[in-house]
Amino acid sequence: MSFHNKLVSADILFLSVLVLTVVGVSASDFFKDFDLTWGDDRAKILNGGQLLTLSLDKVSGSGFQSKNEYLFGRIDMQIKLVPGNSAGTVTTFYLSSQGPNHDEIDFEFLGNLSGDPYTLHTNVFSQGKGNKEQQFHLWFDPTKAFHTYSIIWNSQRIIFLVDNIPIRVFNNLESDGIPFPKNQPMRIYSSLWNADDWATRGGLVKTDWTQGPFIASYRNFKANACIWSPSSSTSSCDGVSKTSTTSLEDSKWQTQGLDGAGRNRIRWVHKRFMVYNYCTDSKRFPQGFPLECKRSRF
């Protein structure tokens, strides 16, 4: 085992306690929480509502969306990605509003050839503008077991987490003129689709349809979040104090940032597993990096 692999193994052992705390969430009811929106019978809810699968074949992919809209919250989903040769496929899990000036918070999993790592693509859109990509490889095989992917979204920041380990923070810097998603309620969306024109090595590797159908699986959805009511234009958190929820842990997301341990973990992720950061892409921004790159830290 190489010195690098020994370090990674030691870090994973140290962080495994965090994984266990996330895996223990109670089972959700996909019948109650989501609608299957496209792909005909390629999207299925199984095991009495505790499991959801999406399938992709040469004819079509599939997708689902939440019945509720949310305005701030913590969203957790356990996902097991397409195994084997997943090149050309994209599995998405994201929050989004609608319209040309929409807000969006993205997890996208870009498939790859067997034995090569998935690329986890993240992005944030506000008022229709994105272009804030950060990409990572994962420190585990995301096709062998379920792992938890989380979004914490409050008025101060957005935190992306994998197995409760923070991988990215996007801070609210509206005081510097940088838009931040805070006014548009968003639904949860997920899809599995063919994107072999760009997804794997810039489109050089195409989808091998002999490996299909491709299947991604979902379980243990949890939304500790403010549900939006379109009829009254209010959320379930309006007028509710941060101390009136069922427990301190339930309300933690409303002001959550990173403590010292969290900052150490995100530095570990960025040092070892980040493969692209728009904030360091000087070829893309020859006139200077976006302002949030200069101001925004963990």
Image (cartoon, helix red, strand yellow):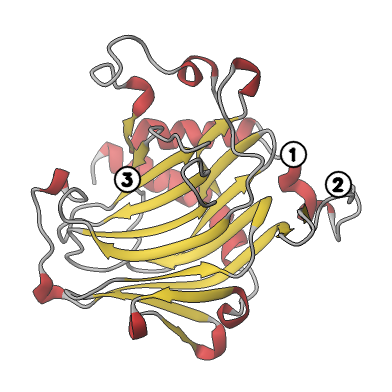
Circles 2 and 3, Cβ within 8 Å, touching? The answer is: no
Circles 1 and 2, Cβ within 8 Å, touching? The answer is: yes
Q: Nearer the viewer, mark 3 or mark 1?
A: 1
Q: Residue at x 21, y 78 (%)?
A: 213
Q: Residue at x 65, y 53 (%)?
A: 74
- Among the 4 quarters of the image, the one containing residue 123: top left
Q: Residue furthest bottom?
A: 48
Q: Label 2: state its secondary structure.
A: loop
Name the kind of residue labelled 3 in the image.
His
Label 3: few (<14), some (14–19) or many (≥20) C-alpha neighbours in 10 Å: many
Above or below, 13 against 266 in this view is: below
Q: Residue at x 56, y 78 (%)?
A: 30
- Residue that carries the numbered disc 1 in the rendered image: 255
Q: Residue furthest top?
A: 287
Q: In the displayed structure, does residue 31 sit left or right of residue 244?
A: left
- Residue that carries the numbered disc 2 in the rendered image: 242
The CA distance from mark 2 to mark 3 is 35 Å
Sequence-first disc among 1 and 2: 2
Q: How many marks?
A: 3
Q: Label 1: state its secondary structure.
A: helix
Closer to the camera in the image, 38 or 277: 38
Name the kind of residue labelled 2 in the image.
Lys
Sequence-first disc among 2 and 3: 3
Name the kind of residue labelled 1 in the image.
Thr
The CA distance from mark 3 to mark 1 is 28 Å
Q: Label 3: state its secondary structure.
A: loop
Residue 7 % position (x, y): 37, 39
Any mark on residue 137, and which?
A: 3
Any mark on residue 68, and which?
A: none
Sequence-first disc among 3 and 1: 3
Above or below, 128 against 200 in this view is: above
